[in-house]
Image (tube, rainbow, N blue to C red):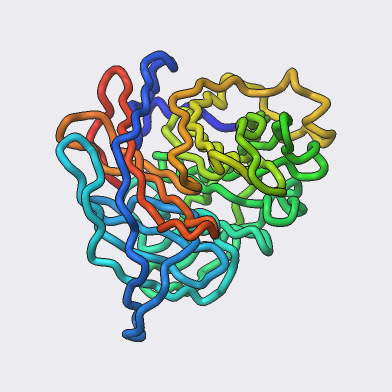
Amino acid sequence: MLAPCGTERSLCAADAPPPATGWSVAYLGAVVFPSAARGPDGREHEITGLSGVTWLGGDRYAAVMDNSASLILFTLEFSPTGQPLAISDLSVVVLSQRHDYEDLAPALSPAGGAPVGSLFLCEEDTPAIHRVALADGIVQGTVPLPPVLRKPRPNRGLESLALDPSGRRLWTATEEAVPADGPASGPGVGTLLRLICCELPAAAGPEPLPAGRQTAYAVDPPHALLKVMAGPQLSGVTALVACGAGHLLVLERSAGPGLPPFENRIYLVDTLAAPDVSACTGPLQARRDLLASKTLLWAGALGINLEGLCFGAAPAAGGRALVGVADNGGLSTPNQLVGFSCRVSPELPATSP
């Protein structure tokens, strides 16, 4: 059972988040992500298929590419109001295992303090959550998954990963429902999935993460579009941001063969206000009474495939930066980094990992 975090120092928001009416998210702009970065071998590595991003503290961030063995480290400069201005100081960490990586989160000390030199990465081809060394990309351990996550739909598996501000809980979710819980999304039809919280062990290292609290979540149907070609329509969760006290920001992304090709939505969810469905072995599709409520904070097409989202440093103007990465999506569009402002009442504290 996930306990409220009222006594923990939060990296992402006030320790006890205010009601949904006190939250707001606004789009501030985007910058093109460089197309290549130098690796430890001295060669230029192509950057494509960015699928996750996380904040490392200060002005440093990390992003991961799907279907690769590459982790990208970079510096991000903001304007005083939180608009992303420039990406610089790129480097590549070559991971010891190649996978379809989808998201990442920093590993903090058990007390929620400074990073301990490793990252968690989720991938959907095994599927698994791995802990890797930030310095050399060596896999330090693999996290056993709850049974419900072990048989996802192909290419609709573990898509999101977020570390709770306490440093003791890790959140994850599949992109769409696992077959045991219900159908996939389609035209006019959403999908039901589980937001899953795992308790991290007290000591750093590759010890297994036991399954914890699970929250049933309904994803919106794919957005309305002007169809211009044949192809499927889909909608799912592509990123989570843990805010403390059981609150999550949930990034939904829908896509289809038309205009606009993508729509992105950011919802606020209070998981502690919803039932724990970890003991529910039947399909969630039959238990809509257990679904968590959600509050829409922002929605927009932007013409991009938004796949990753994390909190960043607090701009001088107040609030908190939300940083997203957009996959080029095979549409000959550039990788992009997207900036949002996130405000609550009262203001978010200026803390760092």
How many numbered discs? Answer: 0
Quadrant showing the N terminus? top right
In the rendered image, residue 151, in percent from the top left (x then y), is placed at 77, 53
In which image quadrant can residue 297 be found? top left
Of residues 259 and 276, the one drawn nearer to the viewer in this rendering: 259
Q: Is residue 45 left or right of residue 74?
A: right
In the rendered image, residue 277, in percent from the top left (x then y), is placed at 71, 30
Q: Does residue 245 lie above or below 181 as drawn?
A: above
User: Do we see residue 122 in this rendering?
Assistant: yes
The residue positioned 53% from the left and 26% from the top of the image is: 269
The residue positioned 45% from the left and 61% from the top of the image is: 64
In which image quadrant can residue 321 be found? top left
Residue farthest to the front, as pictured: 228
The residue positioned 57% from the left and 19% from the top of the image is: 273
Q: Does residue 21 lie above or below 79 as drawn?
A: above
The residue positioned 29% from the left and 36% from the top of the image is: 28
